Amino acid sequence: MTARVEQSLTVGVALPIPEPWGEQLRQVRLGFGEERAAHIPTHVTLLPPTQVAVDRCADLEEHLAGVAERHAAFPMVLRGTGTFRPVSDVVYIQVANGVAPCEELERAVREGPVSRELQFPYHPHVTVAHDMESATLDRAFEELSSFHCEFTADRFTLYVHDGDEVWRTLRRFQLTG
């Protein structure tokens, strides 16, 4: 008897932060020594990196298209900083407006072919420093405490991760509900 080996991809789903703020925050993150920022677009996570069988990718894309068709674009405000310390060494920009639509999208995304339990309760945010020294996390928290931007969240992106920490866009989905 031969064991069947399923091929899988690591995927993620996120709301991109539009320009100029996405690049501004990416550059700040790089300035803190966050090397991952060179390969990860500035975003609010809807689905963290998740293994999906290759033969389920079409189902996932169909599911995400349906999610996008059922949800409308919404105003989003990012303002100030927060942290998950001491549980996790993360400093982030807070979602001040748009939390409820992010939560609804996150639940809808996770109800499909990528149904999974989360390690922590969902909390929409934009990471600006992760797994850095305490002094760097403190600096990020202080330096970005007055950050503020407003935009319309009108799409989300399905990314694939190939084990090299580079996020590659697989498909974009417009919120048309």
Image (cartoon, grey):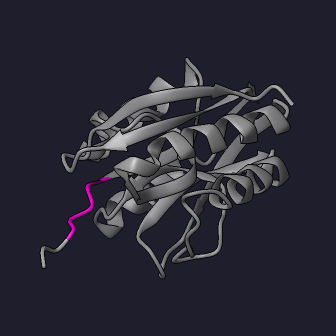
Residue 79 within the magenta-colored segment of the rendering: no
Magenta-drawn stretch, dominant element (helix, strand or loop): loop
Could you tell me residue 139's position as x and y percent?
42, 54
Q: Judge whether 41 appears above or below 131 on screen.
A: above
Q: Which residues are magenta?
A: 4-8
Could you tell me residue 93's position as x and y percent?
60, 49
The C terminus lies in quadrant = top right
Could you tell me residue 168's position as x and y percent?
34, 32
Q: Is residue 75 visible?
A: no
User: Depth check: 165 or 138 in front?
Assistant: 165
Could you tell me residue 29's position as x and y percent?
38, 41
User: Depth check: 19 or 102 in front?
Assistant: 102
The N terminus lies in quadrant = bottom left
Q: Is residue 175 visible?
A: yes
In the image, 84: left or right of 100? left
Find the residue positioned furthest to the left. Answer: 2
In the image, 12: left or right of 93? left
In the image, 89: left or right of 13? left
Residue occupying the point 35% across, 52% down: 10
Quadrant of res 160: top left
In the image, 97: left or right of 43? right
Q: Judge whether 98 appears above or below 170 on screen.
A: below
